[in-house]
Image (cartoon, helix red, strand yellow):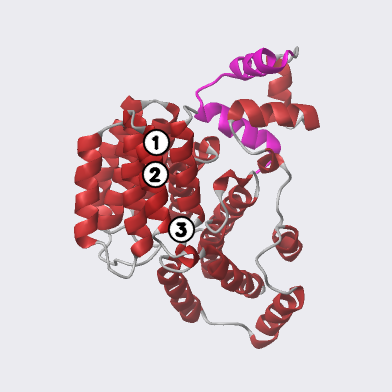
Amino acid sequence: MTIGALIKDLRKTRGWSQGRLAAAINDAFGTGLTREYVSGWERCKVTPGPFYLRCLSAVLDVPLAVFEGEVKRRTFISDVAATAIAPVVASDLLAAGFSARLSGGPSLDEWEEKLSTYGTEYMSMGASDIQRRVSGELVAVQQQLDSRQLWSVASRLMTLYAKTFPGSDGSKAVNWYRMAAKAADESGDQRSRVWVRGRAAIALGYEGASLGMADVFADQAMAMSDEPSLGLLNAVMGKAHAAAIRGDAETARRLMDDGRRIFDSAGSYEQTSDYAVPWWRMNVFISLLAARLGDENTAVTAQDAARRELPDELPRFATHLEMHRGLMLARSGDKTSGVTYAQNALNSLPTEKHSLTLRLLMQEVNNSQTGK
């Protein structure tokens, strides 16, 4: 995707005309930007310089690094190094890549089995452990991208890898989600294309990070297919969270109802995989969404339903539910108790089980205390 196409997507997501985008930048930064100049950006007739990139980042609510260049297939390894992937020694990554190339690498079935394992392990392992292990797999699969099926494998690995970075860090998570979407497009597999974008949307929306990109990924997934699927479910719920955080309760509630209908057709029987959305996980989504909307009855009902079916081996998600209660307390006016409740829940979970999402959730509860 070019910078011009990205600007156009983000602008349309907000429902803005080119003139409205120009006015927003002028109001915020005192520039004399015209609609025609915005049109030139979108048609790639002119490239916005560093100053205007910062303006776009601010008014469109997108990390600045999202606008930085197009990642090409054959520059994948250098980009891996540039993003400082995990505590893996560069020589180990190179060895993994060359070994995969020389040996032909794992078969498609073996890759699918690896994906299943990582999807399960993500639910209980720490982000750094998953990041370290998946980084080597990404270098290996990069050497096998001569078939469409392996582009689908790569896209799902990239999505899992992106999740190990907080969406609020300004670059890494969003860039990896964008690469995952491009890889899924290369696969030509519609379900992968929808799933990757939907997973990005729910990750960013749930975290409350990069809401503009959460909407872009969700809108792309929803435009690709209206067939009930886990990808579409994630997209709709991600967009609902973004709407709730922005204060658009009507849209958030409508999307939550849409998500429930999609879940009725596409929910998972698999209980412990990042690639699944069983009943308990759907209720985790609803629990936080309702807490953000100030709907205590819906939130408590969802929390109770999630606890009844939550597998014992997933204590991190029980912590999510407790922290949602803390958020409700903070937003209802008892802010000190809410922050204390959420912090105690987080502290009760062993540090090695903490996720980046939990830390961002704690940040949200703290921000509620200060009225941010």
The answer to which quarter of the image holds residue 280 is bottom left
Q: Quadrant of residue 268?
A: bottom left
Report the span colored magenta: 1-30
Quick one: label 3 or label 1, which is nearer the N terminus? 3
* Mark linked to residue 104: none
Question: Looking at the picture, does residue 305 appear above or below residue 63?
Answer: below
Q: Is residue 334 left or right of residue 245?
A: left
Magenta span contains residue 5? yes
Callout 1 touching callout 2 (CB < 8 Å): yes
Q: Residue at x 49, y 50 (%)?
A: 359
Q: Locate residue 65, reporting x and y percent.
A: 69, 43
Say above or below: 229 vs 157: above
Q: Which mark is residue 192?
A: 3
Q: Where does label 1 land, which residue?
A: 336
Classify residue 90 as left or right of residue 333.
right
Q: What is the three-letter code of the residue carrying label 3? A: Ser
What amino acid type should be assigned to the residue bearing mark 2? Thr
Residue 186, located in which quarter of the rendered image? bottom right
- Could you tell me how far apart the alpha carbons at marks 3 and 1 are, in whole angstroms? 43 Å
Q: Main secondary structure of the magenta part?
A: helix
> Visible in this render: residue 226?
no
Q: Which residue is mark 2?
A: 340
Quarter in which the N terminus is drawn: top right
- Residue 227 in percent (x, y) is at 32, 48
